[in-house]
Each structure stands twice: as structure tokens, then as C-alpha cells.
Image (tube, rainbow, N blue to C red):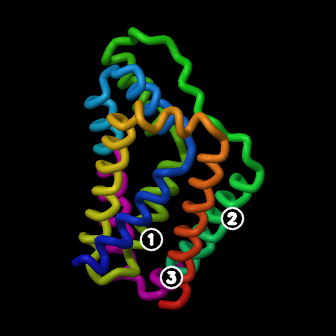
């Protein structure tokens, strides 16, 4: 189980660490102590649904169509290589910093509506969860454990981000912190890509 759970957790965590509107929104909510639990839970459940769809769909297809597995393996490796390169490029370019300015006092439903739009209307979320995690999960004998690892990483990440925002804010206000983070993401992506190619 751990042989599949840990790679799923690491892949999910590395994908979700990427700088984006959703993560910045969660951080801002955490900094203001505004609807933090509901925001974190909504993000994690959204990810869980998308990951489950990817793991179930791609796993069944990989079993039914023999040539689909190597296609997804090399396709996933190519995607991870490009994604990792983008992270390294972002680290080299630098200049990223967290912006936390937004008006406070927004109600729960308006907050959740904004969050769900950031989540479900973002095409990258489908590439990361349904396509990428779904295709990579097909390479593991225990796809369920791989998917559970990815889902667990979402819950750990979002709740840590929301409730740890006060501690993280001074750190991520500095562009250098984002550079270190981007390098770490790039290393993880390329390591998983190499593993996929060598299977």
C-alpha cells in the first residue's frame, strides 16, 4: 500500500504547491481568519472528487486497452518534464511574491462561490487531477492507494495552508521563497518523470 500511497501523496503535493489563484485565495482567507475551515474543506473535497474521477476512469481504460498504459506512461512523463521545466524557469526568473490584499468582511456564500469558480473553472485543475494523476495512477498496481495518497495530500496541504497562513505570510512575501519552492517542485516532477520512463 505504501509503495503506491507515497508516490500519490508526493505527486499530489507537488502539483498543488504550484503558485496559483486558488492557493493565494486560501492564504488570504487564512490571514484574515475568514471562513478558513469551509474554504479548506471545499478545496480538498473538490480535489478528491476530481482525483477519484481520474483514477477510476484511467484505471479502467488502461485495463481494457493494452496500448493505453504505455501511451499514458510516456505522455505523463513528458507532461511532468515540461511542468518541471516551467517550475525551474519560474525559479530562475524570480520576481514572484504573495499578494494578500483583498477586502475583508465577505460572507460565507460569496467566499465559497469565488473559491469554487477559481477551482472548477480553471482548466489546469483538470489537467493536474483527472488527466495527470489519473494517468500516473495507472502505472501502480494499487491505484486506490495512489489516489488516496493524492487526496490525502490535498487535505494536508489546504488545511495546513489555511491555518498556517499567519506563519507563512512573512516567508512567502519574499520572492526568494517562491524560487526555492519552484526548484523543489521541479525536482519532484522530474524525479517522477524519470521513474515513469524507467518502469
Based on the displayed image, in which of its 4 quarters is residue 191 positioned?
bottom right
Q: CA distance from mark 3 to mark 1?
A: 11 Å
- The answer to whether 48 is drawn above or below residue 56 in the figure is above
Pinpoint residue 63: horizontal percent, then vertical percent.
34, 82
Q: CA distance from mark 2 to mark 3?
A: 17 Å
User: From where the camera sits, is residue 22 visible?
Assistant: no
Pinpoint residue 154: horizontal percent, then vertical percent.
34, 51
Q: Which residue is mark 2?
A: 85
Q: Secondary structure at mark 2?
A: helix
Based on the displayed image, in which of its 4 quarters is residue 135 positioned?
bottom left
Q: In the image, which is nearer the foreground, mark 1 or mark 2?
A: 2
Q: Residue furthest right?
A: 93
Pinpoint residue 26: horizontal percent, then vertical percent.
42, 33
Q: Which residue is mark 3?
A: 196
Q: Which residue is mark 1?
A: 135
- Residue 70 left/right relative to 52: right
Q: In the image, which is nearer the foreground, mark 2 or mark 3?
A: 2
Q: Is residue 62 magenta?
A: yes
User: From where the camera sits, is residue 172 visible?
Assistant: yes
Q: Which SS does the magenta portion mostly show? A: helix
Question: Which contiguous range is marked in magenta?
Answer: 46-71
Amino acid at each position: 500500500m505504501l509503495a503506491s500511497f507515497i508516490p500519490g501523496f508526493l505527486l499530489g503535493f507537488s502539483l498543488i504547491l504550484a503558485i496559483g489563484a486558488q492557493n493565494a485565495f486560501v492564504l488570504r482567507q487564512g490571514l484574515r481568519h475568514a471562513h478558513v475551515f469551509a474554504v479548506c474543506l471545499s478545496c480538498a473535497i473538490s480535489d478528491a472528487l476530481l482525483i477519484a474521477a481520474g483514477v477510476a476512469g484511467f484505471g479502467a481504460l488502461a485495463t481494457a486497452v493494452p496500448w493505453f498504459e504505455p501511451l499514458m506512461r510516456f505522455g505523463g512523463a513528458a507532461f511532468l518534464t515540461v511542468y518541471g521545466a516551467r517550475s525551474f524557469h519560474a525559479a530562475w526568473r524570480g520576481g514572484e511574491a504573495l499578494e494578500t490584499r483583498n477586502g475583508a468582511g465577505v460572507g460565507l456564500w460569496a467566499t465559497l462561490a469565488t473559491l469554487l469558480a477559481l477551482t472548477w473553472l480553471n482548466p489546469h485543475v483538470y489537467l493536474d487531477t483527472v488527466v495527470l494523476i489519473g494517468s500516473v495512477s495507472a502505472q501502480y498496481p494499487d491505484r486506490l492507494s495512489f489516489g488516496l495518497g493524492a487526496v490525502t495530500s490535498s487535505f494536508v496541504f489546504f488545511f495546513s495552508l489555511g491555518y498556517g497562513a499567519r506563519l507563512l505570510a512573512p516567508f512567502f512575501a519574499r520572492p526568494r521563497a517562491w524560487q526555492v519552492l519552484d526548484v523543489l517542485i521541479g525536482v519532484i516532477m522530474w524525479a517522477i518523470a524519470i521513474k515513469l520512463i524507467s518502469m
